[in-house]
Image (cartoon, rainbow, N blue to C red):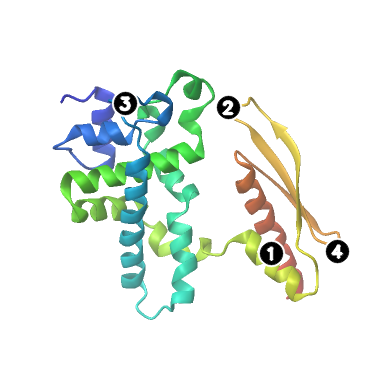
C-alpha cells in the first residue's frame, strides 16, 4: 500500500516507517468517515492508551527510583492525560493527516483536543502492532521527551489543589463561571473566572473550557499561596 506524501511526511515526524501502512491509516480514521470496510480508530485508541500508560509508568519508575506511589501517580496522570496527548499531536501536525467526515472537518475537527488526543493514542497502538513494544516505547519516549523529566511542575491538578487549599481553611469549594466566549464555533476561546468565598478571583482564557478553568485555578492558587508566605 502506497501512502500519500502528507502521510509519508507524518511517518518521518514520528520516526517510524510502517511495514503495514494500513495500520496507520486505520489510526488516522475518525468515526465521522468510517464505513463497515473502513473502521474508525476507537479500538486502536483503547489499545494505545494502555501501551502509553505502560511506557510512561516504566519511564517514571526509572527516572526516580525513590518515589512513592503517591508521588508517581500525579506525574503519571499529567503525562497520559488527553491534553498532553493532544499537545504532542499538535507538535507533529497530526491534525493535518486525520481522515474526517465533511461535517467534522468543517467544525474544526483537525484542531479539537479530544480528536487529536485520541488519534495520538491510536497512532501509538499502530506502531505497537506494526513493530512491537520496543518500537512503540522508543517513539513515545522520543515524542514525550523532556516532559518526563519536567513532569513534577505539571503534576499537580490545579483545580484539585485549589479546592484542597480552600478546604484546609474552612472555605467552600471555589466557583467557576464562564464569563466570555469569542471566536467561531469551530475555534472558540473561553474566558473563565474562578472565585473563592473570600472574594478573591482570577480569570484565564483558553481554547477549551477545562483548560481555562485549570489556568485560572493555577493563577489564583499561586497568588493565594504567595500571600500565605
Disc 1 from disc 3: Cα separation? 47 Å
Quadrant of image for the N terminus = top left
Query: Could you say where residue 19 lies in the image, as x and y percent from the top left?
Result: 13, 37
Q: Quadrant of residue 205?
A: top right
Crowd around label 4: few <14 · some 14–19 · many ≥20 (10 Å): few
Let me know if residue 110 appears in the view: yes
Residue beneath the point at 32% across and 49% down: 47
Of the image marks 3 and 4, the number of the one nearer the N terminus: 3
Crowd around label 1: few <14 · some 14–19 · many ≥20 (10 Å): many
Residue occupying the far front of the picture: 36
Tell me the number on the disc at residue 36: 3
Disc 2 from disc 4: Cα separation? 36 Å
Of the image marks 2 and 4, the number of the one nearer the N terminus: 2
Q: Nearer the viewer, mark 1 or mark 3?
A: 3
Decide: is 217 above or below 106: below
Tell me the number on the disc at residue 198: 4
Query: Could you say where residue 130 lies in the image, as x and y percent from the top left?
Result: 18, 43
Of the image marks 1 and 4, the number of the one nearer the N terminus: 1
Disc 1 from disc 4: Cα separation? 13 Å
Out of 53 and 190, give the one closest to the viewer.
53
User: Disc 3 vs disc 4: Cβ atoms closer than 8 Å?
Assistant: no
Residue corresponding to mark 2: 186
Crowd around label 2: few <14 · some 14–19 · many ≥20 (10 Å): some
Q: Quadrant of residue 79?
A: bottom left
Amino acid at each position: 500500500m502506497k501512502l500519500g506524501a502528507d502521510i509519508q511526511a507524518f511517518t518521518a515526524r514520528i520516526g517510524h516507517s510502517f511495514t503495514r501502512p494500513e495500520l496507520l491509516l486505520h489510526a488516522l480514521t475518525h468515526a465521522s468517515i468510517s464505513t463497515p470496510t473502513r473502521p474508525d480508530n476507537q479500538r486502536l485508541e483503547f489499545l494505545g492508551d494502555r501501551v502509553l500508560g505502560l511506557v510512561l509508568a516504566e519511564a517514571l519508575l526509572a527516572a526516580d527510583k525513590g518515589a512513592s506511589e503517591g508521588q508517581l501517580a500525579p506525574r503519571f496522570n499529567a503525562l497520559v492525560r488527553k491534553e498532553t496527548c493532544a499537545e504532542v499531536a499538535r507538535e507533529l501536525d497530526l491534525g493535518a493527516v486525520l481522515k474526517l467526515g465533511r461535517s467534522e472537518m468543517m467544525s474544526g475537527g483537525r484542531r479539537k483536543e479530544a480528536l487529536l488526543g485520541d488519534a495520538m493514542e491510536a497512532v501509538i497502538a499502530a506502531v505497537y502492532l506494526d513493530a512491537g513494544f520496543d518500537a512503540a516505547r522508543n517513539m513515545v519516549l522520543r515524542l514525550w521527551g523532556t516532559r518526563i523529566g519536567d513532569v513534577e511542575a505539571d503534576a499537580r491538578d490545579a483545580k484539585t489543589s485549589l479546592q484542597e487549599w480552600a478546604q484546609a481553611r474552612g472555605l467552600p469549594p471555589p466557583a467557576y463561571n464562564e464569563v466570555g466566549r469569542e471566536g467561531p464555533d469551530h475555534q472558540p476561546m473561553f474566558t473563565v473566572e474562578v472565585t473563592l468565598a473570600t472574594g478573591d478571583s482570577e480569570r484565564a482564557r483558553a481554547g477549551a473550557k477545562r483548560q481555562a478553568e485549570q489556568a485560572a485555578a493555577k493563577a489564583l492558587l499561586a497568588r493565594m499561596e504567595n500571600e500565605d508566605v
